[in-house]
Image (cartoon, rainbow, N blue to C red):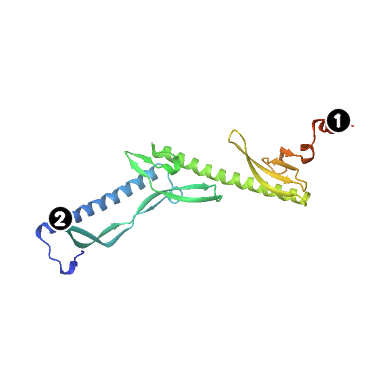
Amino acid sequence: MKQLELFQVYTDEQIIEFNSKIERYKSQTKKQIERNNRELQVLLENGFVLGEDFVYSDEVVKQEVEFYVYNGDDRVYKTEELDVFKGYCKLKFLNYYFYNNKLEECETSFNFERGKIQESCVTDNWRYYKPSSFLKKLKEKNEQSKQQYEYNNKRKSIKEYTIDKYQKLYPNCEVKFEEIYNRNYSNYETVKVTFPNGSSINFILGSEKDKERVYRFTDVVTKEMSGEELLNYFNNQNK
């Protein structure tokens, strides 16, 4: 049960233990501030731009901090007003989310040991990099994310344009987007035009508008023909 501090009388041993915890907390806060300042200096010295490549705060606030020691099986509590470190030093990077087609600015903490930076969101691994090398990785990540965003928006525009084009050309047909997977586990983005009789054509989208090409088609008329009927059908095409 938590004992009310107002009416609590501490033993000499408890006071010593509380003072030890309070001093340890002060020491940890001092180390946090020093580490945060050291990270700031390293980033600035290696070409990182504050506000563009990283964000920083050195905020310290006065706050009641609660400590406890044991009296047998019970906890004995004490609060002390101390400096509490609220600052941070975080990297900024652009990340592209395919599932909702969004390009977002993100922030992430990082490890800094022996003059090197470790962070997995930017590099996709847990290696330590020299700050200058990591900055290069950060720029590459941002550029890659922007390219993915622009590429997928262009693909989306081409897809919507192609569907609209064939809907206008063949208003009686069903026109829709269809993703086709082949045996090699690769996929093709296609627009499928299905005619009222069931025949259909799949067009693979090109890199530009009006650059689609036929990927496959189904002809329900020839599908039901016998070999002899197919021979006559193809032979008549030459007349």
State the CA–CA distance, disc 1 to disc 2: 101 Å
Q: What mark, if any, has residue 17 been given in the picture?
A: 2
Of callouts 1 and 2, which one flags the residue occurring earlier in the amino acid sequence?
2
- Residue 239 location in percent, x, y? 90, 32
> Which residue bears the numbered disc 1?
235
- Residue 237 location in percent, x, y? 86, 33
Quadrant of the drawing holding the N terminus: bottom left
Q: Nearer the viewer, residue 56 or 80?
A: 80
5 up-or-down from 94: above or below:
below
**Number of residues whose C-alpha sits closer than 10 Å to that of mark 2, classed few (under 14), some (14–19) or many (20 or more):** some
**Would residue 50 appear left or right of 204 to someone viewing this image?**
left
| Residue 79 visible here | yes
Residue ranking furthest to the bottom: 7
Secondary structure under badge 1? helix
Residue name at image x 78 percent, y 46 percent: 197
- Residue 133 location in percent, x, y? 42, 37
114 up-or-down from 99: above or below:
above
